[in-house]
Image (cartoon, grey):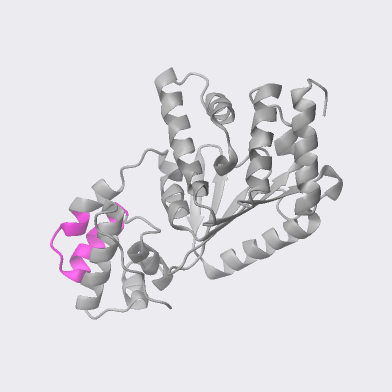
Amino acid sequence: MPGPKDLDPASSPRALLGAELRHAREKAGLSQERLGQLLFASGSFVGQLEAGTRRIQAEHARVLDEVLGTGDFFTRNCKAAAKSRYPEHFAEAAEAEAEATAIRQYSPMLIPGLLQTPAYARAVNRAYDPTAPEETIVEWVEGRMARTRLLDHPTEPLFWAVLDEAALRRETGGRAVMGENLRHIAGLIHRGRVIVQLLPFSAGAHKAMEGSMRLMDFEDAPPLVYFEGPGTGRLEDDPATVARLRFTFELLAASALSPEKSLALIEALAQDYAHEEHP
């Protein structure tokens, strides 16, 4: 297993804890695999903690302090590292996303967050919680837009999305909002910044009909997959599960339209929305 990359302790509390964990583990003479056993986790999980792609939870912090002889360092500091602008079920996934070198996502019902415009994100968040105060909606939208800045970099991370046709046909926020978002996606494609394929209704039944998934690869940490449902989410690092879901994504990409045909359909739908026509 490759060693974790050097982290900038000033970059975030999570990066600081990851660097300190690596230092304490090596000082104690423990491998990642052995420390993982003591945490009832895998060695790859410890590697993700050290690389900053996973956060240290309170139950792990207590064991780390005891095993590594660090007093109450991890117990005290894991709370600071847990602070996030994102909902609790998604916070760890958002932090991992920011460290990923490649993200592959299948989205069955909505445009993925990294491809959303502010108006679309607002419509989605308002639908999630119709009674939320306006300031809460604004905060959620700002958090989602902060995530999209990952795509400001000209080449990294690789972002490859397979979108079900339903995600583009569902008029989230109205026709004007949909048209704007589809033009935004087309612009990202034209700049070579993202790969987008559409899985048409005509593809019929497929292996991922039960829900969405997001695969994330990292430079110096094992890959992760993120599953999401209404108000819930789970990160998984089990190698067999990740491999199975990677194969699922490959099957979806093989069944989807080519990137060129997908772009043509996205632009046609955007034009239809703009002209108030039924797509």
Please tell me whether residue 16 is drawn above or below residue 269 in the rendered image.
below
Instruction: For residue 211, say whether it is visible.
Output: no
Left or right? Give the position of 65 relative to 275.
Answer: left
Q: Nearer the viewer, residue 271 or 132?
A: 271
Q: Point out the residue furthest to the left here.
A: 71
Please tell me whether residue 7 is drawn above or below residue 118 in the rendered image.
below
Percent coordinates x, y for residue 60 in the rendering: 30, 59
Q: Nearer the viewer, residue 128 or 264?
A: 264
Q: Which residue lies at the image location 31% right of the left edge and 68% below the top edge?
A: 6
Left or right? Give the position of 68 relative to 3.
Answer: left
Q: Which residue lies at the image location 35% right of the left edge and 62% below the top edge?
A: 49
Q: Point out the residue furthest to the bottom here.
A: 29
Q: Is residue 65 magenta?
A: yes
Please tell me whether residue 53 is drawn above or below residue 262 in the rendered image.
below
Percent coordinates x, y for residue 192 in the rendering: 64, 52
* Residue segment shown in magenta: 57-75
Secondary structure predominantly adopted by residues drawn in magenta: helix
Instruction: For residue 276, say whether it is visible.
Output: yes
Please tell me whether residue 225 is drawn above or below residue 196 in the rendered image.
below
Percent coordinates x, y for residue 194 in the rendering: 62, 51
Q: Quadrant of residue 5?
A: bottom left
Q: Which residue lies at the image location 68% right of the left edge and 23% below the top edge?
A: 176
Left or right? Give the position of 187 relative to 165.
Answer: left
* Quarter of the C terminus within the rendering: top right
Q: Is residue 136 magenta?
A: no
Percent coordinates x, y for residue 75 in the rendering: 21, 54
Q: Which residue lies at the image location 44% right of the left edge and 39% below the top edge?
A: 146
* Quarter of the N terminus within the rendering: bottom left
